Image (spheres, rainbow, N blue to C red):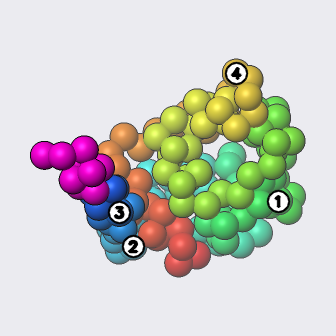
Amino acid sequence: MTYLRKLSFVASSLVILAATPAIAGDAANGEKLFKRCAACHSPDAGVNKVGPSLAGSVGRECGTVEGYKYGSGYLAACEKGFVADEAFLTDYLKDPSAKLSEVAGSKQRSKMTFKLKKDDEIADVIEYLKTL
């Protein structure tokens, strides 16, 4: 293959990969999986538990659940500013403290110690959260 053909092949491969959607979640399965989360989080607006209400959580600006007292690790990350979009939540649900540390730029701990390990389960939970 010539250099230009190789370059063209690589470029077209990148376009195809970029156009490939992330794992599509299943909201119904996410609702079932959410039962693991329900010990600490409510799906109902205004109902905070150990963790904040997750109603309206996808796309929410950092630290804005009324009446919830956020931990210092979360607040340190909030100082850098972020929105809990799908990309953030995907990483956060895998390892909350690691994601907060990444956003804050220094080692942080999250009050949330529960982790989801499987990509499909994370996608399903996020899809469910979008319905709240």
Q: Tell me the amino acid under the disc marked 3.
A: Val
What SS does tag 2 mark? helix
Residue drawn at x 53%, y 78% as measured from the top left:
131
N-terminal of the two: label 4 or label 3? 3
Q: Main secondary structure of the magenta part?
A: helix
Total number of numbered labels?
Answer: 4
Q: Which residues are magenta?
A: 1-9
Q: Which of the 4 quarters of the picture holds residue 96? A: top right
Closer to the eye: label 3 or 2? 3
What SS does tag 3 mark? helix
Category of crowding for the residue at label 4, using alpha-carbon neighbours closer than 10 angstroms: few (below 14), some (14–19), many (at least 20): some
Residue carrying label 2: 27
Residue drawn at x 41%, y 54% as measured from the top left:
122
Closer to the eye: label 4 or 2? 4
Asked if residue 63 lies left or right of residue 23, the reply is right
Q: Tell me the amino acid under the disc marked 4.
A: Lys
N-terminal of the two: label 3 or label 1? 3
Q: Tell me the amino acid under the disc marked 2.
A: Ala
Residue carrying label 3: 15
Residue carrying label 1: 64
